Amino acid sequence: MNPNFVLFLALFPLVAFVFSLLIPSREEKFISYYSIFVLGVHLITTHLVSLLWLIGTEETIPYVGPLIYSTDNVDFYFSFMYDLITAMFSVVGSILAFLVLVYSRVYLHREKGYKRFFNTILLFYAGYMMVILSGNFEMLFAGWEILGISSFLLISFYRERYLPVKNAFKVFSIYRLGDVGFVLAAWLCHLLWHHNIQFTELTHLASEHISLISATLLGCLFLLSAAAKSAQFPFCSWLPRAMEGPTPSSAIFYGSLSIHMGVFILLRTRPMWQLSPYVPVLMFVGGIITALICNGTARVQSAIKSQIAYSSLTQIGLMFVELSLGLDFIALLHFAGNAFLRTYQLLVSPSIVSYLMREQAYSTFERNNFLERWFPRPLAKGLYVLCIKEWNGDYLLESLLWRPLKKAGNFLHIMLTPFGITTLLLVSAGLFTYMNMVKDSVDNVPHILSLLLAFFGLLMVLLSFSERTHARTAWTLIFANHVWITAAVSISDKLSWTEIMVYLSGATISWGAGTLLLMYLKTKEKALSLKAFQGHVYEHPKVAFWFLICSLGLSGFPITPTFIGEDVIFHHIHENQFGVALCAALSYIIDGLSIIRIYSRVFMGPHIKITHEVSNRSA
């Protein structure tokens, strides 16, 4: 089979998305038929490619494209592949995406965000195809980031309401938490093999050049990313919150495709983690716990979409169990069956509600065919209360993750005072002076200073994340983080001016344009506080759109110069600088959260002016 077919499958949805942005919003019929036509063509092509692959040798088909950017340490290029895993995910994804778009054409008729919905679905589908067709970690992470931002935009589709915007940020924060494991795993892979790893060579490299410790560490990092992406224990609680978006987006995102990306990651990286005896055990235990918890929780939910969400998580937990036992083909079949079933259930859920209301009104007999009827009564009641509370999953994540981050940022706000800024500058100047004095006699000084500068960069982004008053201050602190991280890596491993310019050019342009947009908005409005949602997208939709573009550029959205620069930065971090790598990874993750928080607080949610209609918080 011609490898160019693989390139077409990967890039055609992305090109179609770009052209969809040019369609006027008032052309409702045109945008819907255009999107259906695009996915119809892709559906036919996907099935033809899979048929040609089955008729042929059924071997892995790689595609390595031209270089996008190259240095002494890293080569950045398009890399895709096609195998059994890709074939199953692409066939299922193309069918379900096409059906959901056909359903949405009528379901969302005359919605204010009609064009925005179809644009975002095309963006999501482009990211999905980039993930499953990726041939190396760079392409996979690019698609991974596209899935994250499209997820945020679809959950917050009803952006004039409080809960959709708040829950969209919650889901995005879990996605970014999973990115920590993925970024560190990709960095460790580069340290082990010193070049861009192709998935086609993963089995050979892992079997001959990886130790038990490395396999265990890589497996745990990939398992963290997969668990966060597929809402496995302890991240189960975010999936029902993601159902705030329209029913079609819930069906394609959290019923069928995006929620199974954790299963795909584990399938793709099996040659690494299967060499460790500990990772399959963790995977098995996590899958069993998820299946037990979510099965009970699904049975006590009062909302139909929450019932479907927890039921789907139960099945995905069983897929993790199957993967831990080496039953990859069974897991692939399980994925296909669960995806089709959950999509169907979510699409018909509005009519099911009326049916269940009639059943509850006329069915008065007690059902005794439940397992818990054999439990002791105190145990049954205790389990019931825990399932009603969803096993306190939200409280666990809030108390262990986000609350400590906020407290750390609030404590560090003393740095924003003139005294704190002066002290920081003096300490930095003293460190650089001391480095120049002792660099010839002490070998570890550059590494120590690199760690300190990376830690200062992490402090900047923590301050931005906890900023509650000034939007421009939080925005500038994110740019300062990029500068500190660049300085940290430059000390221990000299970066060329070309590499620095590639990295900082995208961040500088995005920061400057975003600052001008915030200044313009400040002249039109009294204040831009981050204490509550402002909802300025009502009166300034164009400003909101361009600020979103700046936010994506500053956060390193694929494939901006910042995204390529971040990849270059990590390739310059050595194996004895795990602290620097951890600070850099946390900085990139938290700055994405802070950027999306600034955008959502300034432009989304109920409007701050009482002259506009404002929905209830519970709406």
Image (cartoon, rainbow, N blue to C red):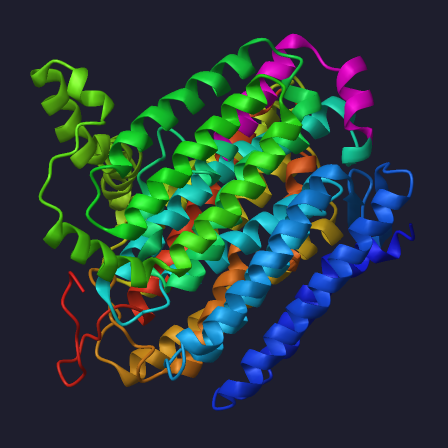
Range covered by the magenta-colored residues:
201-225
* Residue ID at (30%, 77%): 536
Res. 598 in view: yes
Q: Magenta includes 75?
A: no
Q: Is residue 449 visible?
A: no
Say left or right for 319 vs 616.
right
What's the magenta bit mostly, secondary-structure-wise? helix
Q: Quadrant of residue 506?
A: bottom right
**In this picture, is 237 found above or below 323?**
below
Q: Tell me: 350 left or right of 559.
A: left
In front of the other: 414 or 277:
277
* Residue at point 66%, 58% (across, down): 559
Q: What number of labels is visible?
A: 0
Question: Residue 334 placed where, x, y %?
Answer: 55, 35
* Residue 511, percent from left and from top: 49, 64
Can you give x and y, in whole percent of width and height, for residue 106 in the image? 44, 78
Residue at 65%, 67% in the rendered image? 39
The relative height of residue 25 versus residue 371 in the rendered view (above or below) is below
Which quadrant does the C terminus fall into?
bottom left
Q: Position of residue 133 (x, y in %)?
A: 72, 47
Q: Is residue 202 magenta?
A: yes
Side (left or right) of 281 relative to 463: right
Asked if residue 478 is positioned above or below residue 28 in the image, the reply reads above
Of the pair 403 and 318, the residue shown nearer to us: 318
Q: Nearer the viewer, residue 447 or 343?
A: 343
The picture quadrant where one finds residue 217 is top right
Picture residue at 11% right of the left edge, 35% below the top: 366
